[in-house]
Amino acid sequence: MLNIDCPYCGPRAESEYRCGGESLIQRPALDCSDAEWADYLYTRNNPKGVHIERWHHVHGCGMWFNAARSTVTHQIFATWGMTDPVPELPE
Amino acid sequence: MAELVPSLPDPQPLPGVARLDLGVLSVRRLRRFGPALPELPMSADLAVGTAARADGLLLAAPAPGEWLVLGSHSTIADLAPTQDPTAFLALAVGEAHAIFRLAPALAAEALAAYAPIDPASLTPGTATRARFAEITALIIPEPDGSLLMLVDAADADHLVALLAFMTTDP
Amino acid sequence: MSGYRLAEGGRIDRSRTVRFRWGGQPYEGHPGDTLASALLANGVSIVGRSFKYHRPRGLLGAGLEEPNALLQLGDGATTVPNRKATEVELFDGLSASAVNAWPSPELDLMAVNGLVKRFIPAAFYYKTFTWPHWRWFEPAIRKAAGLGRAPEAADPDRYDQRHAHEDLLVVGGGLAGLAAALEAARAGRQVLLVEGDALLGGAIFGRQSADDRAEAERLAAALSALPNVTLKTRTLAVGYHDHNLLSLVERLTDHLPEDRRRGPRQRLWKVRAGEVVLATGAIERPLVFDGNDLPGVMLASAAGLYLERHAVAPGRRVVLACNNDRAWGAALALAEAGVRVEAILEARAEVEPALLAAARGAGIVVETGTTVLQALGRRGVTGVRTTRLDAQGHATGEGRRLPCDCLLMSGGFSPVVHLHSQAGGSLGWDEGLQAFVPGAQPQACRSVGAAAGDLDLSIRPLWHVARAGADPSPSAWVDFQNDVTAGDVALAHREAFRSVEHLKRYTTLGMASDQGKTSNVNGLAIMGTLLGKAPADVGTTRFRPPYDPSTMGAYAGLRRGDLLRPAAGLPAHAAHEALGAVFEEYGHWLRPAFYPRAGEGEARAVAREAAAVRASAGLFDASPLGKIAVKGPDAATFLDRIYVGTISTLKPGRCRYGLMLNEHGILFDDGVVARIAEDHFLVGTTSGHAAAVQAAFQEWLQCEWTGLAVASENVTQGWAVMNVAGPHARTILQSLETDIDLSADAFPHLAHREGTLEGVHCRIQRVSFTGELSFEVAVPTRYGLALHARLMEAGAPFGITPFGVEALMILRTEKGFLHLGSDTDGMTLPQDIGFGGPVTTKKVDFVGRRSCLRPDGQRADRRQFVGLESLDGRLLPVGAHVLRPGEAAPGRSQGWVTSSVNSPNLGRPHALAMIEAGQSRLGEEICVWDLGTSHRARIVDPCAFDPEGVRMHG
């Protein structure tokens, strides 16, 4: 049960959120190749370490935001708005 | 034929639990992070997560670019059209919500039983949308220790059942 | 063994008597006893039978580490299987019996299993009883190897749950925990200390027990006096989760006589702590020698606890076998209390002189460099055969035979590192302790006391007793509860299951309800001796919550019955009820399925309703249909990107059917979109899906199209919607007071109007899912009940018929109208249902469009939405597969029936289906097959009634 610091509401239990998977994924244009489109839909990074991902504060402000979380320890290094720049993060 | 007669829910469903019949105005800025502010008292000073009273109205800012106003039905109905339609979506949504006031004795226990949020963050002056059992509630603590809770209308019966379960001695 | 109560001492209330029944026999104990201590005091020696071999077993421990004394507590709906006698606080009227023993543990007829023991070692079921089929033998084997029985009625008890946020949580109320809590409290911290036992103080035994007890009381008193401290007993921390969240189970009434129990039985706490101190102590390890599972063989610390807490002696002639200092404390304390302790068999060659002197003073014979080779006896220990140990720890030379009726053993102590590990902490091996101790800890948590390895043992490792070169013995027990021997560890090693994870699963060592608390380290260390590896290099398996078995009810809490998945009632629920509606849950709404009249079953009622709608008029509660307000200068642009069709060309006051996909091109939702104004739309969604559609809208607006000026709001619950459908629909509505012009010219099909109806604000749309002339009338929720009544009244002259969801399904199926989720599934693309046009021709991109253009989406043989006519007049089963005529199953399925109804309006059945290349096969005869029955059918257009739509457009 993670404790996630929503940029708008502050720290809340994981049960208030829904995880939106990897963030910073670019949506290709309509004329992209099948391979590029498949990449967009299915290919995801699976790091052992810092994972940049989206969270949706469903039972809260309703906002989407980004988080950097360690896939090893679950430590959350930072959370920031959807359109804000990525902050400094550990390796 | 006569005008349709409204059906109103029980105003006192449980001891310590009152259901309030209020109008609710929902104001959403068309640009989530834009500069425009709605024509509401004190809306300029209302930070996200806070609530304030002004002109007989209770204002809350549950999220960026969102405001909720609680007041009498007629006041709310009058307030909706005064919001700049090029900047806001302003709807009277009282019918879609249910508003409860929990007495102080019940409030702390209800939060401990059903809400994972840290109650220390729920102080008078805050307006917090949070998880309550399986539903979402806007929680506004009052200075007298009572708790206002705003939930979807369809969740009203379930909320009362949760509070009843908590207070009933089996 | 013959345990007995001492005349003095203990923390029991000798002035009162508690009556209980064990195996049907009456016994007595005292308040403060556990069931285990009371049985021991009453001289009960065999408390159970082992899981596999049905060997007689006595008490091994005194706490939650106990593997043997499993019992069935109580009976009826509140019976609890597999409770440990050591954890049951004695109460008046308690009734319990051993599990896995019939008729009793003393005389267990299933002990025949022991006779074939050598044929059923660990993992025997992978290699034997496999021909002709394992299933022949499985029921008998499972029945023979069972434990307790589950109650057959619903749990009548109530369970609470609570959230808490604490500054400092101290887990464990022993001396270390109490001291840590007091220090923190005096420094101003807010402290919650939890202790799983009924008493504070922890494992107090040995010669200093009086001093330790006094110290514990002093600390507890100091803590109780502080306002910033909360102490909770009978509260066990069972799980350590992410970000310092711990789950605790508080037992509220289990210790009370049944007639004095009030309120919730147990409470699950979910505590988010700023910091955690783990003071969880250490658990003693058995020694592994032949016969170590005989009744009368007990952990030394357990004997010490029974003495200190309950004033019970474990036997009349006691021998201690050990390899560390701490175990001596129990023996010396027993001797001091007047129990006859014959000898200490000390594996170490040297022992601290003070201990030797104390033993001598107590008349205890000490043999160093010596241990037990074998415990003797059949139904209880009667003596031991000793052996000397060489420098490598192998049994050597000749020992002697020593009579005893109680053999205490201690192979060392393992710090309780479970919560530390669950929290993500690593373990290190402490060579001096011969135990795993807490290592690095990523969360805000530290361990203190014995849990941190703060123990003085001076231990000599002795993982199993065997002569040099001899294999670990199959008569020496490692895991008492799952009946796993040292020989089984050797078997796993021989069969190449050598990693600690394989050892566990192959032998089931550590997999019983005690989760290896007294067996894991011995087992992995024995594997280490076989591999030539240190225990640290063999490693441990993963620690998972709960630390101790916890009742399911505590985790369920209130989420049962009506509170599990509450269904919301409609605004006009009372009206539907009064009309005799049969309700069903559709999504999270409770809706009328049909309204049976007297003597009608479902089929008759539904058919009557469906016929009545087309004959004259029907009334349907459409309130759950989703409604989302979408507004802004970019609203039209936004909706064009969301929908398959084009929305921006919709004129104000008009509606259009819209289809939404997800990014995989799969149909996600459908509904009618109305344009209120240039920049304002009302999006209709399927019933119960409004929240999901609103969430999808916000995801696109917040994450991808962040520059669009659009706001959306789910307003579904603000409106009660009544659908009047049928030839007389307009006439009925026109009889009401309204400023809306309902005439055919002024109000065409797919139009949206706003105004006043019967004095209240009203929105009306001409949309039709029935295929009839149809008006959806929306008023604010509070007027829903009144509107329903007014419409019934106005429609009475026309025989207006309330109809439910089932009749609606008949009507829309007759019309071939798609129902998402019934006719479509997770593979359906828009081109499959005839909406492929925009995929190729639309001017702008929309969600899922690119996915539709993939090669798989362009296949000519994709399943397509069609109708089916039943050629033999029988109803085609939903889910029936389509085969070529004459083809028998199993064959290659070309699709299946998705919707199928007996149509009263057609006078025959009609079905819908998804069939490969169906649109180009209209008229073709096919075969439909389901569970052995075949039907002949013909592929037809989905719409079988009023294909021109004359009624709908009227």
Image: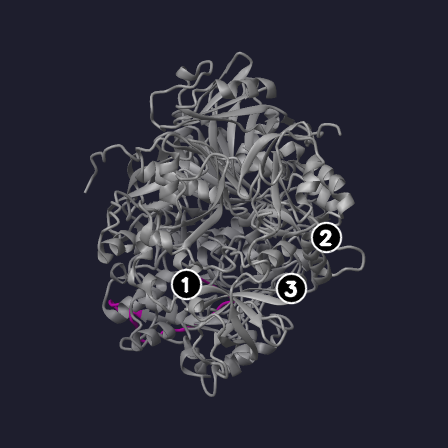
Relative to A34, is C790 above or below?
A: above
Q: Residue at x 57, y 58 (%)?
A: C815
Could you tell me which chain the residue with mark 3 belongs to? Answer: C
Chain under disc 1: C
Residue C837: x and y, percent? 37, 54
Dot 2 corresponds to which residue? C595
Q: Which residue is mark 1?
A: C510
Numbered tag placed on residue A18 in the rendering = none
Q: Residue furthest front?
A: C745
**C-alpha span from label 3 to label 1:** 66 Å
Label 2 chain ID: C
Q: Are marks 2 and 3 in contact (CB under 8 Å)?
A: no
Q: Which one is nearer the viewer's eye here, C599 or C83?
A: C599
Disc 2 element: loop
User: Looking at the picture, which amino acid does disc 3 mark?
Assistant: Leu
Which residue of the protein is positioned furthest toward the left in this rendering?
Answer: A91
